[in-house]
Image (cartoon, grey):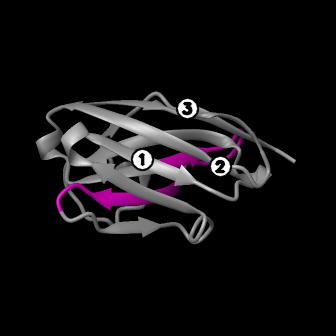
Amino acid sequence: QVQLVESGGGLVQAGGSLRLSCAASGRTFSSSVMGWFRQAPGKEREFVAAITWSGGITNHADSVKGRFTISRDNAKNTVYLQMNGLKPEDTAAYYCAAASRGSYRAILPSQYNSWGQGTQVTVSS
């Protein structure tokens, strides 16, 4: 089982930037893919980005391409989500997730088996 703890959320004005962090512990060697999802009130949880632990191959949702970048530091067992050019529609709770199997193409929440508690991102207009 992988334990995940997110940090870095907050309140930012439109056009601003935030960097989210996800610290992983436990059986991280079994996690082949790490992902970020977000969920706004009344909406379903949606895929944001994913990255493989080994190869660093990334996948970003179309809605964040060119603005958000997922990366990882294996030495620190930490995954990051750099968010630039934030928009009010990016407001949501952001969750880190780990998939013990799968690829960077895993975009469904059901494909991930460990989740963090979430961190709130609020973008004001």
Mark 1 falls on what kind of element? strand
Quadrant housing the N terminus? top left
The residue under label 3 is which amino acid type? Thr
Is residue 2 rendered magenta in the image?
A: no
Q: Quadrant of residue 68?
A: bottom right
- What residue does disc 3 label? 119
Q: Quadrant of residue 115?
A: top left
Magenta residues (range): 37-54
Mark 3 falls on what kind of element? strand
Q: CA distance from mark 1 to mark 3?
A: 13 Å
Mark 2 falls on what kind of element? loop
Compared to residue 118, the image places residue 39 above or below, namely: below
x then y, percent, for residue 121: 65, 38
Q: Mark 3 or mark 1, which is nearer the start of the sequence?
A: 1
Camera-side residue of 9 and 47: 9
Kindly identify the residue that appears in the image at 12 percent across and 44 percent down.
29
Is residue 46 rendered magenta in the image?
A: yes
Kindly identify the residue that appears in the image at 31 percent across and 40 percent down.
78
In the image, taking residue 102 as reference, residue 96 lies left or right, namely right
Q: CA distance from mark 3 to mark 2?
A: 15 Å
Q: Which mark is residue 62?
A: none
Q: CA distance from mark 2 to mark 1?
A: 13 Å
Q: Residues within 10 Å of mark 3 (few under 14, many from 20)?
A: many
Compared to residue 64, the image places residue 120 above or below, namely: above
Q: Which mark is residue 17?
A: 2
x then y, percent, for residue 73: 28, 47
x then y, percent, for residue 42: 71, 41
The residue under label 1 is which amino acid type? Tyr
x then y, percent, for residue 33: 27, 54
The residue under label 2 is which amino acid type? Ser
